[in-house]
Image (cartoon, helix red, strand yellow):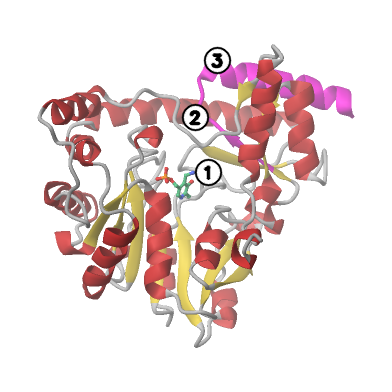
Amino acid sequence: MISKRASEFTSFIVMDVMAEAEALERKGEHIIHMEVGEPDFPTPKAVIDAAIAALKNNKTRYTHALGLLELRQAVCDYYRREYGVSITPDQVLISTGTSPVLLFAMLAILDPGNEVIVSNPRYPCYQNFIGAAGGKLKEIQTYPEEGFQYRHKDIAKKISRRTKGIIINSPCNPTGIVMSKEHLQDIARFDAPYIISDEIYHGLVYGDKAHSILEFTDRAFVINGFSKLYAMTGWRLGYLIFPKKFSAVMQRIHQNFMISANGFIQWAGIAALTKTKTDVKAMIRTYDERRRYMLARLTEMGFVIHVEPTGAFYVFADGRKFFTDSYKEAFRITEKAKVGVTPGIDFGSGGEGFLRFSYATSLENIKEGLNRLERYLKKRK
Ligand code: PMP
């Protein structure tokens, strides 16, 4: 028998769309992938060189359960440099991606029946990390005209003694919206024990710089990693920054469940944080060019972009003029227009009627993909 908990895990629909697109490709179809949230750039050379050097130097053993001290120190230096905040290596856990640290953060703070506030729409995996740790989701509806951002009064209404945390994600997947300093300050003032801030898209911004929640409170669990900014999804490397008093428990959790993150890859992580400035700058310039093109084309076609996205690499476009069922439509677009897109419903009921387009693919692909989509929509009418 499958456990009740496991049977309640929701699926990650974008993966189903991707599987469908790949099945079409196996039949010989040419598909443009705008569904995937994965950088198309190669990992910067300095990172690859550091991994090779680490392998040649036999850095192939377990490390400290919290991670290599040198990498944890590099994370502290990075947060000081970028945000002016002061954290120490005993507040950092390195793991194989941000996904596992999200789970470990939930295991560290949730007791059965505890609630975590999340927005609707949101990154679809959050609910499952919460559920796996025995917690409950407390959803807050957000609105397209406001960039799907929390309203103060809605949080005030939902917060209770059962609330253990509020999840924020800026720059946001799926909306690409970057939270303002004032908004972060406002969230930090709420009487919830912890703010869980998913900062994995930090650095990928095309307007004002994103602020870290740590600038406003130390009651925070910060999730960050290497997948997006350094084009390192397949390396599986991420980290968690937590309040000092969790140091021993985080170490215990990681010792038991992972022992440690991959040794040589942690050495490569140091290079990512310290030697990739030029590569990152070039990637951001290219993403921004694609972002502008995509925004203009989607708007021309009749999609509505309520608030301009200035972060991550997504456009969350309102397609209610064309369809109501985003799930059906995303599969239809994949099959008929040969363009992979993510249905808004993947991110919760608040995303219904929307599609998420990723511009983590070449401008050439984006042009061709949007041409195909335009032809499809014209025929559809
Ligand atoms: N948070 C958000 C908002 C994401 O979009 C992703 C990746 N899609 C993750 C966390 C997990 O990233 P990873 O495990 O590759 O570090």
Of labels 2 and 1, the one closer to you:
2
Look at label 3 and name its amino acid. Glu
Question: Quarter of the image holding residue 146?
Answer: bottom right
Q: Return the x and y of residue 363 as percentages of the image width and height.
A: 52, 19
Residue lying at 60% horizontally and 65% vertically, measured from the top left: 5
Q: Residue most toward the top? A: 28
Q: Measure the C-alpha gap from mark 2 to mark 1.
A: 14 Å
Look at label 2 and name its amino acid. Ala
Q: What element carries label 2?
A: loop
Above/below status of 92 relative to 315:
below
- Residue span colored magenta: 355-381
Residue 40 magenta: no
Q: Measure the C-alpha gap from mark 3 to mark 1.
A: 21 Å
Name the side, left or right, on which 196 lies relative to 138: left
Residue located beneath label 3 in the image:
364
Residue located beneath label 1 in the image:
309
Residue located beneath label 2 in the image:
360
